[in-house]
Amino acid sequence: MTITELAPPLGEPLTLAETKAHLRVETSADDALLTALIATVRDYLERETGLALLTRTFRLYLDGWPMSRVIPIGRGPVQTIEAVTVYDAAGGPVAVDTSGFTLDGQARPARLILPSQPEPGLAINGIEIDFSAGFGASGTDVPDVLKRAMLLHAALLYEFRGAVPPNSQPAAVPLGYDRLIAPFCRRRL
């Protein structure tokens, strides 16, 4: 199972003004750095939790249907299923009728059941499911606790900006970060 992002987020959950206020930065000298740090901490949080903070479209690739008929979707919260495509043996796309599907988009991972699941003709990535996931279109839709974790993380990276090059970020996470994001992390046995 592979998930790719079809379009990047249209913004960031944190604004530059929010971040500067948290850091007590009053000049614009570090605006470019702070903007880059906001993207870095968002990306890190999304990778750690499997969440999409701002709503955007993804594609899930499957080799075959799960035996249980329940399709886990590792990015969430899933808002909508946009399209389901199965490729025949010649590599031609066949749209799957998704009317009557069942989606539990808030589950971790999200779960989808399709009424019909035609067999793919390709052995690898023969099934594509396009879906949108995220809390909403703007940072105000993102839970405050996640924004707080991002602000703490940005502050730590900003403090160590001279010690760790930008391409090696994030170099560390602040104390308490794991506790803030813990309710949103997937648990594995």
Image (cartoon, rainbow, N blue to C red):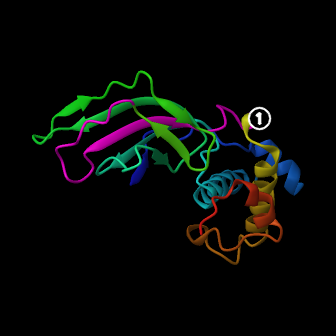
- Residue 118 highlighted magenta (yes or no): yes
Q: List x then y, in percent, for residue 187.
A: 64, 63
- Residue 81 highlighted magenta (yes or no): no
Q: Is residue 143 above or below residue 44?
A: above
Residue at x 74%, y 44% (from the top left corner): 14
Of the 4 image quadrants, the one containing the C terminus is: bottom right
Say which element carries label 1. helix
Q: List x then y, in percent, for residue 55.
A: 59, 36
- Position of 136 with respect to 100 (left or right) is right
Name of the residue lying farthest toward the right: 24
Number of numbered discs present? 1
Q: Is residue 7 above or below residue 83?
A: below
Amino acid at circle 1:
Thr
In-front residue for pair 31/1: 1
Q: List x then y, in percent, for residue 18.
A: 82, 45
Of the 4 image quadrants, the one containing the N terminus is: bottom left
Q: Quadrant of residue 105?
A: top right
Q: List x then y, in percent, for residue 118.
A: 25, 36
Mark 1 lies on residue = 140
Residue numbers of the magenta segment: 115-140
Name of the residue lying farthest toward the bottom: 163
- Position of 189 with respect to 148 (left or right) is left
- Position of 157 with respect to 116 (left or right) is right
Q: Quadrant of residue 162?
A: bottom right
In-front residue for pair 111/37: 111
Q: Is residue 159 above or below residue 16?
A: below
